[in-house]
Image (cartoon, rainbow, N blue to C red):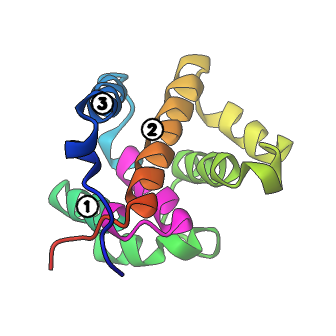
Amino acid sequence: MNARIDYYKASREATNAMLALEKAVSGFGLEPALLHLVYTRVSQINGCAFCVDLHTADARKAGETERRLHGLTVWRETPFFSPRERAALGWAESLTRLPETGAGDPEYAQLREHFSDKEMVDLTVAIIAINGWNRLGVGFRKQPAA
């Protein structure tokens, strides 16, 4: 697969806006380990090779285990994730697959059980951000470094 355009060069305004959103998300106070899991899982769903590579590398640097990273694609079938992480992953998948799920009530109920109102909004904005990056990466065929 060949890269298309370099979206950073094509529109600094657009990428700066995305970077500002990313910076805001990092300041919300959600656990970085949780965000790494959510970013990786959403990127897997969206098929963004660049983002999967980036976020798994970031997760490893932050101390995430290989076992959990490998189990992320089948997180529902493994005992590796806490109830809070499961709630976040379920919500992330539900919002990423919005046309199919309609942000389902079961996912919302689980989220509500483990997150405050502020954290629910903050997590949702983080999911919006990674979905945006994925659309840039997939749309313009951004590749991980060899």
Q: Which mark is residue 129?
A: 2
Q: Which mark is residue 26?
A: 3
Residue 109 placement (x, y as % from top left):
78, 38
Q: Are marks 3 and 2 in contact (CB under 8 Å)?
A: no
Amino acid of disc 3: Ser
Please identify the quarter of the rendering in which residue 56 is found.
bottom left
Give the camera-side residue of 142 and 25. 142
Residue 86 shown in magenta: no
Q: Secondary structure at mark 1?
A: helix
Q: CA distance from mark 3 to mark 2?
A: 11 Å
Q: Main secondary structure of the magenta part?
A: helix
Amino acid of disc 1: Leu
Residue 4 placement (x, y as % from top left):
33, 65
Give the camera-side residue of 142 and 107. 142
85 with respect to 91 (left or right): left
Give the camera-side residue of 138 and 60. 138
**Residue that carries the numbered disc 1 in the rendered image:** 54
